[in-house]
Image (cartoon, rainbow, N blue to C red):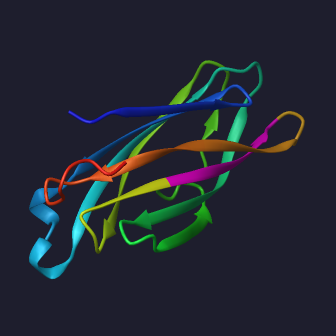
Amino acid sequence: MSDTYSATTHHIRVSVRSFFLADQSRPEEARFMWAYHVRIENLGREPVQLLRRTWNITDAHGRTQTVKGAGVIGQQPVLEPGESFEYTSGTPLETPSGFMVGVYHMAATDSGEAFDVAIPAFSLDSPHQDGRLH
């Protein structure tokens, strides 16, 4: 069972759970795979759209990779008040643990106001490490 990490920014709650994918990992080749499930909830009073994302993915050696792009999983969802959007994606690492943190770049669809929403830092821990590091 994985932990859920949550953060709320500008009335948008982001919750993330990560899962180690043993069947897609190759520890002997320094390839460790994770999936992460994200739920984005609009707790505010106006519609918002997720336009872009920025992820910082850090491995156990402190190497950080920054990934930027439009939307998530090929979509730029609009969330009406009270609505949520969920998706699952994944990431590889060369070490048996690490963590991810990021930002969704969003806009209020009525006013056009741009704002950033924090994606909480979450651990990428596998059974191939000595204890939890994060």
Rendering quarter of residue 41: top right
| Residue furthest out toward the bottom | 29
28 or 67: nearer the viewer: 28
Return the x and y of residue 59 as percentages of the image width and height.
38, 67
113 w.r.t. 46: above or below: below
Quarter of the view holding residue 56: bottom right
Q: Is 47 or 91 nearer to us in this picture? A: 91
Q: Nearer the viewer, residue 89 or 27?
A: 27
Residue 103 lies in the magenta-colored region = yes
Classify residue 17 by image quadrant: top left
Instruction: Pick the residue in front: 58 or 50.
Output: 58
Looking at the image, residue 118 sits to the left or right of residue 73; the answer is: right
Image quadrant holding the N terminus, namely: top left
Left or right of 64 in this view: 81:
right
* Residue 68: percent from left, percent from top: 60, 67
Question: Does 11 sit left or right of 126 as displayed?
Answer: right
Q: Residue at x 47, y 63 (%)?
A: 57
Give the residue at x 79% y 38%.
109
Q: Which residues are magenta?
A: 101-109
